[in-house]
Image (cartoon, rainbow, N blue to C red):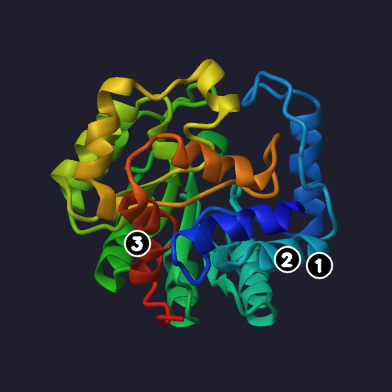
Amino acid sequence: MSEAEDVRRFWKRLGLPGLVDIHTHFMPEQVLKKVWAYFDAVGPLTGMEWPIAYRHEEEQRVALLREFGVRAFTSMLYPHKAGMAAWLSGWAADFAARTPECLHTATLFPEEGVDRYVRTAVEGGARVFKAHLQVGAYDPNDALLDPVWGLLAEARIPVVMHCGSGPVPGKHTGPEPVGRLLARHPRLRLVVAHMGMPEYTDFLELAQSYDGVMLDTTMAFTDFSERFSPFPKRERARLLDVRDRVLLGTDFPNIPYPYAHQLQALERLELGDDWLRAVCHDNGARLFALPSS
């Protein structure tokens, strides 16, 4: 059986029309190659061997997601310094325009003019933003970002934020900065990437405290991540409590294992088919108002 057949068998068994993957990476070729080179070099933000499973050209990567039956995905991209975010968001807008399944993604950085280019992206149809506190090394409570969070909260546009301290801590990662942000912007739709790895418990508590906080499954529960950041067994029951706020994410193509393994990792949690249907499709479809089929 091919990998695509394996993935499709998973969602067909659940009676779904496909998958909604909120955390996939597409970015300008020169940027993506630098990201891959970083992984190849075992950079300090990874600290371990990390072979890229889907080191393909853009067209082939899009085709693979289509073969897998992913009916909606994102182009998560992020700046590591000032002066990049507006350009990256412009590229992502073009990518979404030529890729019907891609949810128009944008990004940001605490810099002069951030409120202007974020508003431009919102008015241009952006449906999701990416914020990477680890790579960008910035505090989400930076005063330059305050009007941006207010704008996104008002527009009800979700922000996928890498804010957990995995695989290694950053200066501004962890639940404390995010907790302060949410105290000021409680209506912000915030998707905590990687389930908040490794501070799973703290981010689950934030999800139960704020209606707009969600979590994506990216790399969580997989054999790879369980080796260095296992999800606490005592918290599995809480995953049922927040079943309407957990979203499928995979990190495709930058994963060191087959795409299907993320799905298998969710299935072996044994939380039931209703939970799998909600996580792998229905929650994302509702968040982005996707058509029923």
Q: Which type of secondary structure does the marked residue at label 2 adopt?
A: helix
Verify CB contact (< 8 Å) between mark 2 and mark 1.
yes
Q: Give above or below for 218 relative to 92.
A: above
Residue 22: image location, x then y, percent: 49, 57
**Which residue appears at 37% of the width and 37% of the height?**
270
- Rounded to the nearest whole Å, what is the CA distance between mark 2 and mark 1? 5 Å
How far is the residue under mark 3 from the one under mark 2? 22 Å
Give 206 or 120, whichever is nearer the viewer: 206
Q: CA distance from mark 3 to mark 1?
A: 27 Å
Q: What residue sits 36% from the left and 28% below the top?
A: 174
Q: Amino acid at mark 3?
A: Asn
Q: Residues within 10 Å of mark 3 (few under 14, many from 20)?
A: many
**Residue 186 visible to the viewer:** yes
Mark closest to the chain's N terminus, 3 or 2: 2
Mark 2: few/some/many CA within 10 Å (<14, 14-19, 20+): some
Q: Which mark is residue 283?
A: 3
Q: Position of residue 114 (x, y in %)?
A: 46, 61
Question: Given the image, on which type of amino acid does mark 1 rest?
Answer: Glu
SS state under label 1 = helix
Q: Is residue 159 left or right of residue 37?
A: left
Residue at 53% over, 17% down: 228
Residue located beneath label 1 in the image: 59
Q: Are marks 3 and 2 in contact (CB under 8 Å)?
A: no
The vertical placement of 208 against 293, above or below, is above
- Name the one closer to the observer, 72 or 75: 72
Tell me which numbered mark, 3 or 1, is placed earlier along the sequence.
Answer: 1
**x, y percent for residue 255:** 67, 39
- Name the residue carrying label 2: 62
